[in-house]
Amino acid sequence: MNVYLDTETNGLNDEAEIIQIGVINDNGSVLIDTLIQCQGDIPTEVSAINGITKNDLSCAPTFPQVFDKICETLKNAEVVLIYNAEFDLRLLKQTSKRYGLQMPDINASCVMRHAWVCS
């Protein structure tokens, strides 16, 4: 079964972290939907875009606390469909590395690139 992944982050650079992750399957069932605490700040301009503030994350789990569920969900999928996959995959690896974790390889496909090809 395919899954669809989306993330929100606290920025775009090499220090950015995932602060929200959502994964659904082909049937629309929610497999993961959680905010994630980050070590860095969330700039005001980022909060203006994604609506997430540092205060929103105060009771959220840390990335290591949700890491196993993320890995299991993505590894078990036939294909992980992601809009702008290059960015989300980089942030998954970058956030994992920040906590000394190794993100496994997954079979991902970029929906954004497919849209470009089809237009």
Image (spheres, rainbow, N blue to C red):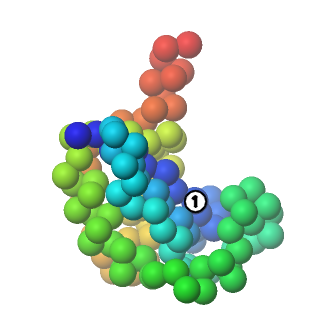
Query: Is residue 90 shown left or right of residue 56?
Result: left
Query: Is residue 98 shown left or right of residue 76?
Result: right
Q: Residue at x 23, y 40 (%)?
A: 1
Q: Which of 22 and 108 is in front in this view?
A: 22
> Which image quarter is the C terminus in?
top right
- Residue 109 in the image: above or below residue 64: above
Instruction: For residue 108, say whether it is visible.
Output: no
Q: Residue at x 46, y 57 (%)?
A: 22
At which x and y percent is residue 95?
44, 70
Query: Is residue 43 shown left or right of residue 9?
Result: right
- Residue 73 in the image: above or below residue 119: below
At which x and y percent is residue 62?
45, 82
Instruction: For residue 28, say whether it is visible.
Output: yes
Residue at label 1?
8
Q: Is mark 1 on a helix, strand or loop?
A: strand
- Residue 11 in the image: above or below residue 68: above
Q: Which residue is drawn at 27% across and 58% down?
A: 73
Furthest residue to the top? 119
Q: Give the amino acid at mark 1.
A: Glu
